[in-house]
Amino acid sequence: MTDLLLRGVQLADGSHRDLALRGELLVDPADLGPGHRTVAADGLIGLPGLVDLHTHLRQPGGEDAETVASGTRAAARGGYTACFAMANTDPVADTAEAVSHLAELGRREGWAEVVPVGAITKGLAGQELAELGLMHRAGVNLFSDDGRCVQNAQVMRRALEYVSDFGGVLAQHSQDDDLAGPTACCHESAIGGRLGLPPWPAAAESVIVARDIELARLTGGRLHVCHVSSAESVELIRWAKARQLPVTAEVTPHHLLLGTAELEGYDTTYKVNPPLRTDEHIEALRQGLVDGVIDAVATDHAPHTPEDKDHPFDVARPGMIGLEQALAVVIETMVASGRLDWSGLVERMSTAPARIGRVADRQGRPLEPGQPANLVLIDPSRRQVVDRAASWSQARNNPYHGRDLPDPVLATFWRGRATYGWDNL
Ligand SMILES: [Zn+2]
């Protein structure tokens, strides 16, 4: 690893500084040796490495769609230095052995830190609690059955009680299976009726959010609401936060940018769970993110093979990739419009996710001497027309294909190592 001096970097607060990287750390520029490389970084912005609370890396069991290596390369391309790897793999990550194996795979093959998420219930079946305590001892703090929602309120209550003993967090995929069953795939609305697609009403999400907020109040256990997609959910979380309940929430880049109109052509790339919704919901999500009601942006990066997607709309697998364009979408929807400044973006894409996921000792740190050298160097004025064929992810289900978006990431450093873009400097 070459020592590196980045001269004149603009930080999120608008100040300018020389950033010195030596080994895995940021150091005082005066402490760099004589052999270091110097890069003029005038006009570039340096941000703490992004942290994604919600990534599907698909390994083990889904390596034809994505692997730890390919998924974390996509993460590095998008400016991320950490990914929380969801538990709905095959086999499910519901034991200490499984999460330890994934963490080890991440250390060996990852281009970003891989933080395993443990399942809440065995096999994601929603019945019996998984080895929550043993997984915690193996380093897990965030638990989720994502892909599925814990339907049984008593199981959810017990899980919240269990993890509150060690400060764990339950990340819930909020979807009432009776209101939005396995074929539900289109926001319940006029367009859904016209297209003849099975309805996924916003209430199927918010009834679970309301229930879980009450369970968080009852137990004191920490609830994190995954991929909030409706205005009603935002209002419920706002209500919970006003009462200081232990509730946090995330929104995806695709729910901030894309709406039901994308479904007109029945392109299964736009099938996602929860579904894309209408303008009033999109606006509520953006405002919730501005207000801090929604704490974080998380990608729900969900790689699929073409075979998984090559079906009629109501049968195709839900999910879209997002790691490489997440920062671009947040810049486009929130920063370019003046609704978030760079500090606000850093809070929602790095600091808050690191705090919620309990990795704030090493991720989401300020860019100061003595801190781990986890950072992304961006030029927000660069743009590109997204080409899914150029993706660093193995998957091609990219909902931004053909769209003109910012292309901000010049280089990403994880523990001092350039995981993306060394040649761009
Ligand atoms: Zn989900």
Image (cartoon, rainbow, N blue to C red):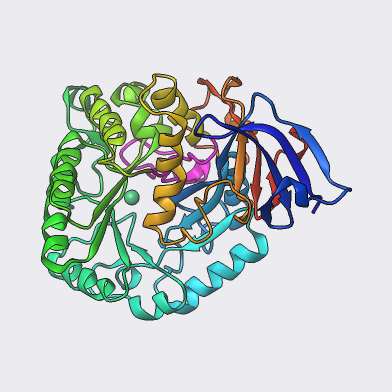
Q: Nearer the viewer, residue 222 or 309?
A: 222
Quarter of the figure with the N terminus: bottom right
Could you say which quadrant of the image residue 172 lies in? bottom left
Q: What stretch is highlighted in magenta?
A: 297-324
For the point 24% across and 32% down, the residue is 197
Give coordinates of residue 248: x percent, y percent: 27, 51
Q: Is residue 424 left or right of residue 270?
A: right
Q: Nearer the viewer, residue 163 or 126?
A: 163
**Residue 268 in sight in this render:** no
Queried whether the magenta region covers residue 136, the answer comes back as: no
Q: Is residue 396 left or right of residue 422?
A: left
For the point 48% across and 74% down, the residue is 98
Q: Which of 47 and 332 is in front in this view?
A: 47
Q: Nearer the viewer, residue 418 or 315?
A: 418
**Residue farthest to the front?**
30
From this view, report whether residue 370 is shown above or below residue 259: below
Could you say which quadrant of the image residue 314 lies in? top left
Give coordinates of residue 364: x percent, y percent: 49, 50
From this view, report whether residue 372 is shown above or below residue 348: below
Q: In this view, does 261 lie to the left or right of 118?
A: left
Q: In this view, does 22 lie to the left or right of 160?
A: right
Quarter of the figure with the C terminus: top right
For the point 12% across and 51% down, the residue is 243
Queried whether the magenta region covers residue 299, the answer comes back as: yes
For the point 16% across and 52% down, the residue is 208
Give coordinates of residue 84: x percent, y percent: 46, 56
Could you say which quadrant of the image residue 387 lies in? top right
Give coordinates of residue 345: x percent, y percent: 43, 35
**Residue 183 in sight in this render:** yes
